[in-house]
Amino acid sequence: MRPRSGTVITAALVSVIALFIFAKLHYSGTAPVSLPVASCDSELWKHVYEPERLHVIEPCTAVEGRVVSVYPADDGDLHIGLDPDRKSVLNLRNVMHMRGELVVEIVCEHSPADQGVAPFCAGFTSPVAVPRQGDHVRVIGSYVTERDNGWNEIHPVTRIEILGK
């Protein structure tokens, strides 16, 4: 006897829902640690372009992981793709659209190509140490969700400690 198409559809729907719930729990988008706010440089927010687009989850946290990519953005920020040791810092958008990487942004690391953003970096260049691809690092900064893309980030970064290769 062949299964009824309604049963097959129900089973497929239940499987998809179970998979979504598992992924949502596994990639919960939670900060691994809450650091005292004084551990992060609140002055860096003056140099964040459109800060209202960033929803702060944790004002100051530390995340460890391996640097996957490093690239300059037009807004003067240096974008770092981090493969985090604790995957719980990721949300589903990080997994689906950022290849499982946490976005890390050092503000005003270089001169902005976009002149509309230039006033945010005027007279300021970030002192944050820039890691290399492959470095294992600890990133300290604000843990946020970027409104336009929906993924989680450390933005702005207060400091990066290189733990090893």
Image (cartoon, grey):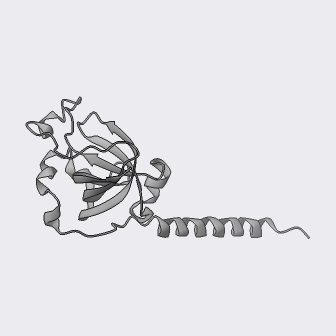
Q: Residue 101 placed where, x, y %?
A: 43, 51
**Rendered position, 86 above or below 129:** below
Residue 16: x and y, percent?
62, 64
Q: Quadrant of the N terminus?
A: bottom right
The answer to whether 37 appears left or right of 154 in the picture is left
Residue 147 or residue 92, whichever sits in front: 92
Asked whether residue 92 is in view, the answer is yes
Residue at left 7%, top 37%?
A: 123
* Image side of residue 157 versus residue 41, left or right: right
Q: Residue furthest left?
A: 123
Residue located at (65% from left, 67% from top)? 15
- The quarter holding residue 144 reads bottom left
Total marks in image: 0
| Rendered location of residue 111, percent (x, y) | 19, 32
Where is residue 54 drawn, in percent x and y? Answer: 26, 54
> Considering only vertical position in the picture, is 134 above or below 28?
above
Residue that sits furthest to the right in the current view = 1
- Looking at the image, is 107 positioned above or below residue 59? above
Compared across the picture, whether 82 is left or right of 76 comes to right
Q: Is residue 57 visible?
A: no
Which residue sits furthest front?
A: 164
Q: Where, by quadrant of the figure, is residue 86 drawn?
A: bottom left
